[in-house]
Image (cartoon, rainbow, N blue to C red):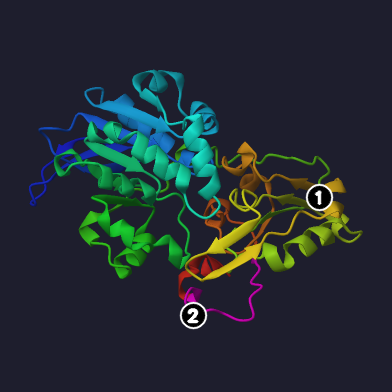
Amino acid sequence: MPFKTSLPETGTWRLNIAIGTCVPLAYRPQTMRNVLFLFNHDAGHQVAHLAGTAAATARLYPEIACTIACATPAIRERLDTLIPGGDARRLEWVDLTLPLWARAIAAVFDRVLPSSRLLRLRLHRQMFAHSDVVVSTERTCLRVKRHLRREEVPLFVILPHGAGDRSVSYHPDFARFDSVLVAGEKVVDQMVEHGVDRGRLVVVGYPKFETVDLDSQPDFFGNGRPTFVYNPHFDPHLSSWYDCGPDLLRWFASKDGQHFNCIFAPHVMLFRKTLHISPEYKTSRRRPDVPAEALAAANILIDVDGLRLFDMSYMLAADAYIGDVSSQIYEFLARPRPAFFLDCRDGPDPRDEKWLMFRRAGP
């Protein structure tokens, strides 16, 4: 597909950048010189959703100064695996690692607030003031507006990580972005219903797929048995882990369960905390640990914080999926196979039942 600039009737220019599809970014032509790709998170699960787009922009538009700002050494390591060397050299790299005093302060509050993320924004506010466009996978970046003069505020673009169906995925903050880049019309409809202006929504597909070999089938066991991947979410109201997850792993470790393999690949945030709080559902729960039987079982692979949680290795390796509300079901369904969903609540909750569309993605 050709890449070009166009002038819509609104008078707002759009720059088309892409990985496989055209990704429009609204901008002011007289000042469009600096694009900041922001990776301000505490884990690496969002990186692959934006890394390829940053690389493509730097490669296709050398006249634009493209900067990648990353929060932690682990995120930088992940970016290094996803962005080819030639593209990496076209990018300017900024390390957002907090100084020791700031880390000490943030650590006190990180269990209940994204304190580290907010401190990085404040300490690097001049970086944002010198940018024309900021592209991010999460909403926290908008907070930096509080620390900038009006004339310094850049345009903000979000490419949401994942394509999940939880109602909490659609926050009013999305309406505050200048452009929202989404995976498909399903997400467009959901965003519009939540009050996002249709004119700000652009369908770009799922950029993470551009960095993954979807035909690969890793074999982590080598025993020829059917393999399930169990992928529980962290939300204490919706996740299956709190009530039945440990028992599920105990079953796989049992005599009957030995006929199968199980990859335990939870949402990476599940094991980042012991106590999880859901502001939307006004509930909190203590996370159970992995049972000893599962840790000792040869037919169970347990990974709660490894890089393979992010690169789709486990989703591509499994013959079937077990989960609850994680958007990784859409990554699993890139190659359709059986999926099973666990709902451990007392009954359906009308607040989110209509959003769980992935449960109707097949027979």
Disc 1 target residue: 225
Dominant secondary structure, magenta? loop
Looking at the rendering, which quadrant does residue 66 occupy? top left
Amino acid type at circle 1 is Arg
**Where residue 286 sits in the image (x, y, percent)?**
67, 62
In the image, taking residue 18 as reference, residue 304 lies left or right, namely right
In the image, taking residue 54 as reference, residue 268 lies left or right, namely right
Q: Is residue 45 visible?
A: no
Amino acid type at circle 2 is Pro
Q: Please check the rendered image and state whether residue 344 is part of the magenta-colored stretch, yes or no.
A: yes
Q: Residue at x 20, y 57 (%)?
A: 199
On residue 350, the disc is: 2
**Where residue 37 sits in the image (x, y, percent)?**
35, 35
Q: Residue at x 75, y 55 (%)?
A: 289
Looking at the rendered structure, the secondary structure element under dot 1 is: loop
In the image, taking residue 315 as reference, residue 223 lies left or right, namely right
Position of the N terminus, as image quadrant, is: top left
Q: Residue at x 16, y 44 (%)?
A: 150
Of residue 161 and residue 186, the one placed in the foreground of this image is: 161
**Where residue 200 sits in the image (x, y, percent)?**
23, 55
Position of the C terminus, as image quadrant, is: bottom right
Q: Please check the rendered image and state whether residue 206 is part of the magenta-colored stretch, yes or no.
A: no
Q: Which residues are magenta?
A: 340-353
The residues tagged by marks 2 and 1 sit, at their Cα atoms, a distance apart of 38 Å
Of residue 133 and residue 362, the one placed in the foreground of this image is: 133
In front of the other: label 2 or label 1?
A: 2
